[in-house]
Image (cartoon, helix red, strand yellow):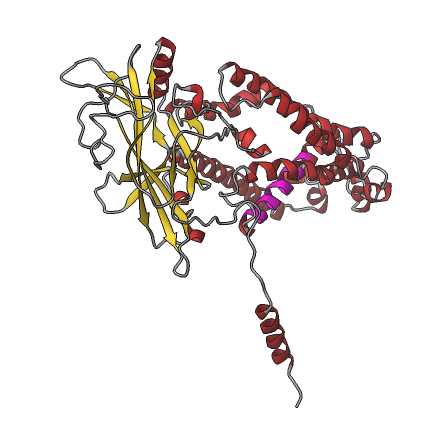
Amino acid sequence: MEWSFNQFIFISIVFFVSSSQSFYLPGVAPSDFRRGDPLQVKVNKLSSTKTQLPYDYYYLNYCKPNHIQNSAENLGEVLRGDRIENSVYTFNMREEIPCKVGCRVKLDAQSAKNFREKIDDEYRVNMILDNLPVAVLRQRRDGSQSTTYEHGFRVGFKGNYAGSKDEKYFINNHLSFRVMYHKDLETDSARIVGFEVTPNSINHEYKEWDEKNPQLTTCNQNTKNIVQGSTVPQEVDTDKEVVFTYDVTFKESDIKWASRWDTYLLMNDDQIHWFSIINSLMIVLFLSGMVAMIMMRTLYRDIANYNQLDSQDEAQEETGWKLLHGDVFRAPIKSGLLSVYVGTGVQILGMTLVTMIFALLGFLSPSNRGGLMTAMVLLWVFMGLFAGYSSARLYKMFKGTEWKRNTLKTAFMFPGILFTIFFVLNAIIWGEKSSGAVPFGTIRVVLLPVVQRGLPLVVALIPYRRLICAAKDYDDVARNRNEAVKSAPPREHRVLVMTGVDNIEHLLQKRYT
């Protein structure tokens, strides 16, 4: 019996499918927790869409553990301003806590000022449990039954209280955590699939403070939901005592571990400025349409004139667009600078494409915190190989003689400009005491070696002269086509003037958006 080719392909596919194995990507493997296993809530940066300057969690006078431990952070987390540390919020798996005191803090003038500033700037507190960021459940404003989630919870809020006309500042000092888990049917272990919080502000009261076992009249350890019924919020002011408390509940969920990030990916992002995006898109389409109409009318008019020529001599005379048809074979004035631009563009394009491919394959999952930024930096360095080659080849095609120097310009020009801007901005952010500032020790130990390794990749193909010198010259192509290469006409407009005209639209857009 002879097998057909289709049967052979089918059996081969079945063979490989039956022998396939699954694996977890590095850094995203699930964790199983049994009843009573300790859980540690970690704190991350304070973030705001209003200022874009992150701050360390302990920049504010929150409860601090006896020893603050920084979690191991990769390059991407450092560049994003993440500062992941331990906290006083600890509990055990599937063991609910009605009310637990974290600490008692007395606000001095500076602490109260910091809290008020962060409340004005709408800062949010970010926490992490089992690599899941905390989220706040919100009802939609349109009255629908669907719910949305927001990253983190607000530091506090402003408002009037007890008939006061002046706005006062209140801090969210009680956190109601809800941990959702998916239980394994065969074992008693479970996996965390959700981490929610409900912030509250309450002015706690007590008779006598006991450091070992504090008892609050507004937060009974044996009574649930006592805080939600309180009507006295905690005001932020100098010499005010703030008692931080929290409670924990657990809820079994049908969400599987592989789908636990779906909720966070569907969040409403306040940073997306839809009006600006649509406005820019409409302006680009409008201007592109105008240019296309002008070009089409010009070409139609020139073609009509050529069809009406009476003599052969008139037909050979170059008029209209024929005056420009040979300009594509003339090397530009700043051919070296253009080659550097093209090489850098190839580097950016290659980095973007490979990053998107890795993201589609799942290697840059959001659970792999900081992986995207790290991958982009490393791919930028690696793509320097193609940047140096494309820049040198294009420069040689323009009959440039110093293509080695041009390759070095590709390696230093744009990275040098970007690093200078980064260094200046980093110094300004560091002056604001923001966690977004990359420490100078990290720049020396991490970033500088990365840049130093990128330079050899850019100039790696210089010894292979055959690859670079294989490009044809523009003048040779023009001679083969028997077309004269004209000299470039003088520029009639200054670059700065034209740049200013181009930026008018952007200034107007920024003014009205």
In terms of depth relative to the viewer, which is nearer, 399 or 69?
A: 69
Q: Is residue 450 left or right of residue 227?
A: right
Q: Quadrant of the C terminus?
A: top left
Residue 441: horizontal and vertical position, in percent?
63, 22
Residue 349: horizontal and vertical position, in percent?
62, 41
In terms of depth relative to the viewer, which is nearer, 329 or 325?
A: 329
Q: Does residue 319 show up?
A: no
In terms of depth relative to the viewer, which is nearer, 54 or 299?
A: 54
Question: Looking at the image, which residue is at 49% across and 43% down?
Answer: 367
Predominant SS of the magenta segment? helix
Residue 443: horizontal and vertical position, in percent?
64, 24
Q: Residue furthest left?
A: 163
Residue 352: horizontal and vertical position, in percent?
59, 41
Q: Quadrant of the N terminus?
A: bottom right
Question: Looking at the image, which residue is at 39% across and 18% down?
Answer: 61
In terms of depth relative to the viewer, which is nearer, 195 or 469?
A: 195
Number of numbered markers: 0
Q: Does residue 250 show up?
A: yes
Magenta segment range?
Answer: 344-359
Q: Is residue 346 left or right of residue 395?
A: left
Q: Is residue 447 left or right of residue 199?
A: right
User: Which quadrant holds residue 404?
Assistant: top right
Q: Is residue 139 above or below residue 116?
A: below
Question: Looking at the image, which residue is at 44% across and 37% down?
Answer: 281
Q: Is residue 86 above or below residue 162?
A: below
Does the magenta portion include 192?
A: no
User: Which quadrant holds residue 223?
Assistant: top left
User: Which quadrant holds residue 283?
Assistant: top left
